Amino acid sequence: MAEALAEQLRRALNDVAADRTTITYLALAERIRMPGPHRIHRLTLALEDLVVEDHENNKPLIAALAIGRGPDGIPGPGFFQLLSRLGRYEGPDRGPQAIAAHDHEKRTVWNFWGQAAPK
């Protein structure tokens, strides 16, 4: 992943963590002024890189704060599939188990990154 994009994403997601909230993929792409075409696809690939980086550094997954636009308020299926590959989650991509796993991840992020977010 391009270093500049990673830094932009981390800054934006740190702000989201400090607010103890989440942000949709579209709103995040707009916040960092990511140009098209296929910006959501490119954004999700960059977020996956952040997941791997945080996982390898034993840190909460800041990318968990980026969510799809669906009513469940969780990331897309690729997030859960990646967590499964990393050994962090076993379960379906949707439904109560995914919602509970995401809730745990986002609270962990808020407690860590929200505190560490530079002001």
Image (cartoon, rainbow, N blue to C red):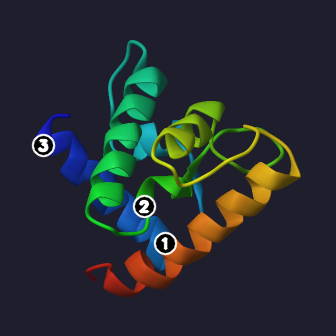
- Is residue 2 among what the camera can see? yes
Choose top left, top right, bottom left or bottom right for residue 13. bottom left
| Residue that numbered label 2 is attached to | 62
* Residue at the image point whose x is 20% and y is 53% from the top: 7
Q: In the rendered view, would you say 45 is above or below 85?
A: above
Q: Secondary structure at mark 3?
A: helix
Q: Please tell me which residue lies in front, 36 or 5.
A: 5
Q: Identify the residue shown where x is 67% and y is 48%.
A: 90
- At label 1, the amino acid type is Val
Residue named by callout 1: 109
Q: CA distance from mark 1 to mark 2?
A: 6 Å
Q: Amino acid at mark 2?
A: Ile
Report the side of 41 relative to 34 (left or right): right
Left or right: 75, with 112 as reference point = right
Name the amino acid type tagged 3.
Glu
Q: Position of residue 23 (x, y in %)?
A: 57, 53
**Quadrant showing the C terminus:** bottom left
User: In the rendered view, would you say 21 is above or below 92?
Assistant: below
Badge 2 local density, few (<14 within 10 Å), some, or many (20+)? many
> Residue 32 placed where, x, y %?
33, 44
Identify residue for label 3: 3
